[in-house]
Image: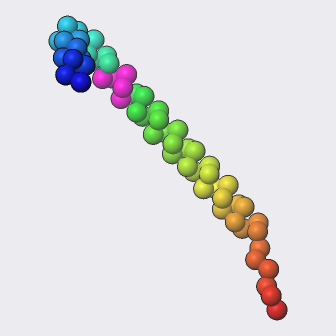
């Protein structure tokens, strides 16, 4: 585990500043896209479950 940490630290130290900034911007864009996709999928799933729930009518046992 220490060797992995040391190699990661040496990799980050070897990279120059603009490259690290590019990685940070790319990571931020990926996070934004993931949040948008999850929000859209959640909204679609919610509307689908609401439609199915309103279509199924409980039977009365009278």
Q: Position of residue 55 (x, y in %)?
A: 76, 66
Residue at the extreme right of the image, as rendered = 62
Residue at the extreme bottom of the image, as rendered = 62
Q: In which quarter of the image is the C terminus?
A: bottom right
Q: Does the magenta stretch include residue 15?
A: no
Task: From the image, give the main secondary structure of the stretch colored magenta.
Answer: helix
Residue at (25% x, 19% y) in the render: 4
Residue 11 lies in quadrant: top left
Q: Where is residue 24 in the image (x, y as percent from the top left)?
A: 30, 23
> Is 61 drawn above or below residue 51 in the view shown?
below
Q: Left or right: where does residue 60 sit relative to residue 41?
A: right
Q: Left or right: where does residue 43 sit relative to residue 62?
A: left
Q: Is residue 17 visible?
A: no
Q: Quadrant of the N terminus?
A: top left
Q: Is residue 21 visible?
A: yes
Q: Position of residue 61 (x, y in %)?
A: 80, 88
The magenta region covers 24-28
Q: Left or right: where does residue 55 sit relative to residue 2?
A: right
Residue at (51% x, 42% y) in the render: 38
> Is 62 drawn above or below residue 49 in the view shown?
below
> Is 56 drawn above or below residue 35 in the view shown?
below
Q: Where is residue 56 in the image (x, y as percent from the top left)?
A: 76, 68
Residue at (36% x, 26% y) in the render: 27
Residue at (36% x, 29% y) in the render: 28
């Amino acid at each position: 585990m220490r060797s992995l940490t040391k190699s990661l630290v040496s990799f980050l130290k070897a990279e120059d500043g603009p490259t690290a900034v590019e990685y940070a911007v790319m990571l931020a864009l990926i996070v934004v896209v993931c949040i948008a996709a999850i929000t859209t999928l959640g909204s679609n799933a919610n509307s689908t479950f609401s439609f199915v729930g309103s279509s199924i009518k409980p039977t009365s046992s009278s």
